[in-house]
Image (cartoon, rainbow, N blue to C red):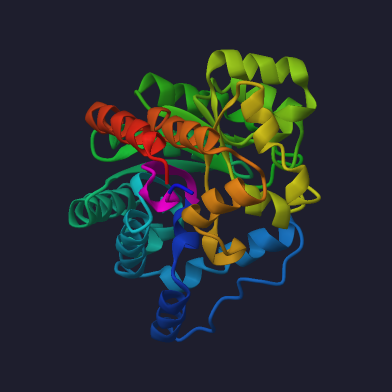
Amino acid sequence: MRDLSALPKAHLHIHLEATVRPTTLADLARQAGLPVPQTDGFVEFTMFNRRYLGLVPVMQGTHPILRVIDEAVEDAAAVGVVYAEFGISPAFYVESFGTLEAAVEAMATAASAAAAAHGIEVGLMMTVDRTGSIEAANETARVAVAFASRGVVSLGMAGDERNNPGVKYEEAFAIAKAGGLLSTPHAGELVGPDSVRGAVTVLKADRIQHGVRVIEDPALMKEVAELGICLDVCPTSNLMLAVVPSLAEHPLKALLEAGVRCSINADDPIFFGPGILNEYVLSRLQLGLTDEQLADCAWSSIECSGASAALKASSRLEIDAWLARTS
């Protein structure tokens, strides 16, 4: 079988705090004088979200999150990622850095340095909290646009979909799109096709984080395919948060066969276990994707990202060369 670590790929659905290495998490907790945050013991999203927020206290100060960025880029480069687009929530670090802008500045500078050190491209996805105020979302979008030439490439949205429709943040995503950023909201994870439709029609999504429940609406799935919107799919996350009952029933293969563009991602490795390379292996061995489909996912991940035109061009050639190999 072809070596999946040699397949050029982008990582587009990866939340920064959850890239932390277990050893680093323990070290940061020790330095902060706090217990090591628990990263297991959840069976659904509410408890998972509490576990996620539990990471933030040990990453306060001006150094820890910057260390996490460098290590996350190093880990990505080691498994064939040529471009990483980390979801960041700088509002978590306003107290540490002083202002939202200062937090973004520090993260963008660290991401640029890590990209140069480890030989890949890195973009940042500013994240709107879908349980927060419209005003806060608009401010996040304005700051994201201000950093559009300094590493921020997209505006995302995370949080509990249930009873928190993304469409109420239409203005924030309009600000982002007008400022040249990609629209990359979460949708179609805990809530069904209606959430995806809102992301498509109201938030003008270029990519959708998750989006897998579009499979429940064939007409909408066809529309997503025709529009070329990429779904940033996370198979293990979907299993562990009960979006799908089993990997055998995961819709990734069916989505690809219906012409929907998809990328393969790890979401939150510190909680779910697999990194992006493991997710590609899983997609081959357990979801039944062919190497041609895996290459299509890799190309979608790069072409639909905020990567440079030069990286997209070179990656297309390298993916074609990977497919041309017999093993």
Position in image of residue 174 (x %, y %): 47, 21
109 vs 4, left or right, is left
Work out whether residue 64 or residue 83 is closer to the camera in this orientation and state it.
83
Q: Is residue 5 magenta?
A: yes
**Residue at the image point whose x is 77% and y is 33% from the top:** 192
Residue 203 in view of the camera: yes
Vertical placement of 213 versus 250: above or below? above
* The quadrant where residue 287 appears: top right
**Residue at the image point whose x is 53% and y is 81% from the top:** 36
The span picked out in magenta is 3-14
**Residue at the image point whose x is 55% and y is 57% from the top:** 268
318 vs 29, left or right, is left
Work out whether residue 63 or residue 320 is closer to the camera in this orientation and state it.
320
Q: Is residue 83 magenta?
A: no
Vertical placement of 187 versus 218: above or below? below
The residue furthest front is 326
Position in image of residue 187 (x %, y %): 64, 35
Work out whether residue 255 or residue 176 is closer to the camera in this orientation and state it.
255
- Total labels drawn: 0
238 vs 37, left or right, is right
Position in image of residue 260 (x %, y %): 60, 24
* The quadrant where residue 199 appears: top right
* The quadrant where residue 78 appears: bottom left
Residue 307 in view of the camera: no
Vertical placement of 119 versus 97: above or below? above
Work out whether residue 192 or residue 318 is closer to the camera in this orientation and state it.
318
